[in-house]
Amino acid sequence: MVMDIVFEFDQNWYVLFFAFLLSWLIISISRKNHRGKKEAKEQLCLALGGLITLLLMEVFATSTNLWHYMPGNWPIILWPTYFVAILFGYQLLRFVEGLFS
């Protein structure tokens, strides 16, 4: 089975991508101590590490037949969406930590 990476995909992917991106921005801006190069590096490292982890999970799962993507059904926007979802998760974690500290 050959998996094709697709650059044409449903418009709802943009809704999902920008929902995570805007949520990340809103929480990031609303936090009081969100600035600094250290936190930016932490976010980038977490998002890249998470993205690599998700990529490895996808490759392993599809190559061992845990699940299948129909040929032509692996939209490239999946990976930037994973990336901003991880960024959102980071901000959500920090926001909740701030509420209880």
Image (cartoon, rainbow, N blue to C red):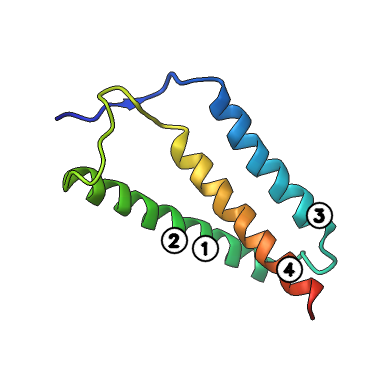
Front-most of residues 63 and 65? 65
Q: Residue at x 16, y 48 (%)?
A: 64
Residue assigned mark 2 = 49
Q: Which mark is residue 46?
A: 1
Q: Residue 5, position in %: x, y?
A: 32, 28
Distance (Cα) linking label 2 and label 3: 23 Å
Mark 4 vs mark 1: in front: 4
Using the rendered image of the protein, determine whether residue 45 is visible from the camera's viewpoint.
Answer: yes
| Label 1 element class | helix
Q: Residue 9, position in %: x, y?
A: 46, 21
| Label 3 element class | helix
Q: Which mark is residue 17?
A: none
**Mark 4 or 3, nearer chain start:** 3
Distance (Cα) linking label 1 and label 3: 19 Å
Circle 1/circle 3 CB separation < 8 Å? no
Using the rendered image of the protein, determine whether residue 36 is visible from the camera's viewpoint.
Answer: no
